[in-house]
Amino acid sequence: MIASSSPIVRLGIRAASPPAVMVGVYLLFAGHNQPGGGFAAGLVFGAVVALRTVAGLQRPSRAHELMAIGILIIASVALLPIIWGDALLDQHVVSVDIPLLGKIKTGSALPFDLGVTAVVVGLLLAVLDGLGAPELAEEPATLRPRSLR
Amino acid sequence: MVLVLLGFHLAGVGMVLALGRRLGIRPLLALGGTAPAISAVWAVVQLIAGSSDRTSMVTWVGGLDLELRFKVDSLALLMTLLVSGIGALVFIYAIGYFNRDTTGGSRFSASLLGFSASMVGLVWADSVWTLFIFWELTSVTSFLLVGHKNQDPSVLAAARRALMITGAGGLILLAGLLVLAQQANTTIISELPAIGGTSGTIAAILVLVGAATKSAQVPFHVWLPGAMAAPTPVSAYLHSATMVKAGVLLLAVTGPAFANVEAFTTLGLAFGLTSMLWGAVGALRQGDAKLILAWGTISQLGLMVTLLALGTGKAVFAAISLLFAHALFKAALFLIVGEVDVRTGTRQIDQLGGLASSMPLSFAAAALAGLSMAGAPPLLGFTAKEAALESLATLDGVQQIVVSVGVGAGSVLTVAYTLRFVFGVFGPGPPTVVAPRRWLMTIPALTLASLGFVGYLVLGWVNDIVRPAAVELNAAADYSLLRWPGLTAPFGASLGILAVGTALGFGVIRRNVGTPEPKGARTADALLDGVLVAASRATGRIQHGSLPVYLTVMAATASLAALPFFTGLDTSGLVLANQPLEMVLAAAILVSATAGAFVGSRLGAALTLGAVGTGVSGLFVLYGAPDLALTQLLVETIVVVGFVIGLGHLAQQFPAASGGWRLTRLAVSVLGGLSVTAALAAAAANSVGQAPLADLKAGAVDEGGGNNIVNVILTDMRALDTLGEVVVLATVALGILALANVRPPEVPG
């Protein structure tokens, strides 16, 4: 739609997507000790998805499923400790020594963040679908505002 | 064990629903009746074993006393026996009542079993919250059952009326229970202390009104006759033996708490006596046998409410005895009406005749149950009525006169409508064609009716069931039902009532055989319709769908809410800037915002808003909040992209605004800006202590295993909040998708 006819924008977004996804993954994992976290990661992925939608590029399309998976992960992280007799949402920290990489410390906060990410991306997809963005991207010139072409 | 029994009920509901497609209505009813049967047998075993109280509970939120708390004491066992025992019989009866090929079997059977589960939960409940939850569940399942024949608009109206009245009563009850629990400082029903004072009066009135809606007391009784649109097994079970007793039960268990509250007695007597008289008069005006019984139920419930409102030992004992006897005879009479209806095709007493010879077993059952209802010996109803009359002897002054006259007149009318019912249905009249007997309908009715006689024979056993239940409520209620009271004043009164009632009854058997206009129900419906119409008008006025107006209203409301902060404003601590760079950012933000207010194109406005947000995130960076800045920046980015997409649907330029509307928006904007500024400045000037940074830091590393405090707070310390927020996000997303799929209605022309 708005940008799909401009080769510069298309190419730019295509080129920027992989690094942006890497930044998102970094934020997701770094979040526990550095600035970042599941919400920020979700927003970065969401931005990628939104830009790709604007440019009419391929992108994930399953808003419901992503949200369902996200909530399922979060609910499991919340409820599993109860089965082991701990409190709701009790945090488990695991640290592993891996050769080359050194000591890696993680915990149940990571899947929790992953769930948050999935829900945020799902929400953005839902908003994009709700705004009719994919249809706009496919529609011929008649629907497009003239100046935005 | 209590939880296991409830589990049986729920499993039964699940199985009935799962097998609903494959089985006919009769196997489904047999399946549904299993759980009540088990529960009834359990109650009998407990009664014989004479076991002590037992409490079971599942804690939900401990700090708020929110728990599912059950206690099976003597009163609960008595009620279980009635609810589950009559329930099992009603399931058997329903197998005979419905034809083999009746559809909707799984819905009916599951609702009936669901009701049974709700009702046993209600009688076992020992926390006011548990009681309330099951109370509401009985209203909902009752709605489903009353509205079972959902093709008929009058049935649906009756179901709605019942739900609205009992539902509204439920809300009033909730308010009453809140006040009661607050004042008594406990939510455990069996440990409620006697309360007093103004809040005691308020609680008593609210609880009484709640109970009156459920137990169909005048003027809330209008739903009960309409609820007779339900299939007769439902009427027998819900609207005579169990659900309508929930209000009586509630008054019984809360009665000790309200013992010192005068309003409880006064209002209770007002409800009870009016209902007893008006219900009995109503029964005499009906030509439909089932409606005679329904109005009779209102009257009998009125007597029970009267006795409980008196609250003396004898009165409580009489009320519990009457509850027991009434459940037996009234359920039996309803079952008989259902059989007459199925076998003759009518319930109008002027169209029935000669049934005494063509339906002899039913006639015998009706005679037994009817005599019990009228309070004639040698039946259980007689002993209960004696106990009630005897309890009046202990009163004094005006109260004794008023209550005695009311109860006496009510009892006379009761005898009269009993005669009208029995002779109207089974007496002489045009000979009626009768279909073959269905044993599954006859046996339960005969069983319940003869239990009234058996109970009289083994009165010691009945006493062993009733007395402990009454004593639990009032330690002074240590009385016995008497098989033969001797030549006492109450016995004389009983005989007098029977004599006058019989004379009156024979006079009105064949009078007023039509069905009078249900004026009360009309009024209630008109009231409900009025509420709905007013609600939809108000919604149309408030929710008119203009986004700018919504936003303006919201901004104005939020700004006004911030007004109190102006008083806390302390300008002495304010500085222009902590760092010079802030001023640069602030200037950029101001320029962008001003440009945003004046720019004519929508895209320009979106971009300037994005610039404002980016500037704010720069301020976050300056103050050392990288997480906040990162999130803000990302959100701004996505919002701008979203704007760009959304703007594809809209015109490029903002529409021109009229002068007044422009001024309004200007005023709201200025007010909003001022309020936010004042609120922030006031908050900064009035800090209420230091942030527990050291604790948070230590907690983050030790417990959360992370160095980013913000993230540890989100994923560990306050993870429950995050969980809630995520659910909100998902709900919003689903809402957006749903809204997006709504097509605007086509405008004709």
Image (cartoon, coloured by chain):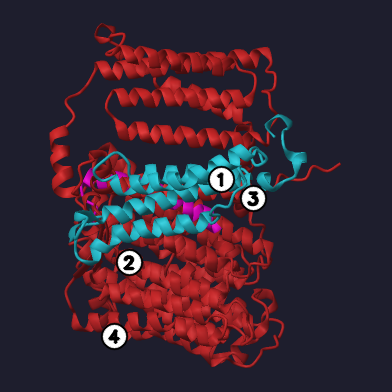
Chain colours: A cyan, B red
10 Å crowding of disc 3: few (<14), some (14-19), many (20+): few
Q: Are marks 1 and 2 in contact (CB under 8 Å)?
A: no
- Residue A27 placement, left or right of A13: left
Give the letter of the chain under mark 4.
B
Residue B325 in the image: state x and y as whole percent: 37, 74
| Residue depicted at x 40% and y 47% | A22
10 Å crowding of disc 2: few (<14), some (14-19), many (20+): many
Residue at the spot of label 1: A52
Q: Nearer the viewer, residue B686 or B535?
A: B686
- Residue B405 placement, left or right of B608: left
Q: Is residue B25 magenta?
A: no
The quadrant where residue B623 appears: top left
CA distance separating discs 4 and 3: 69 Å
Tag 1 secondary structure: helix
Q: Are marks 3 and 1 in contact (CB under 8 Å)?
A: no
Give the letter of the chain under mark 3.
B
For discs 1 and 2, the disc positioned in front in the rendered view? 1
Residue B580 in the image: state x and y as whole percent: 31, 11
Residue at the spot of label 2: B123
- Residue B701 placement, left or right of A21: left
Give the letter of the chain under mark 2.
B
Res B458 label: 4
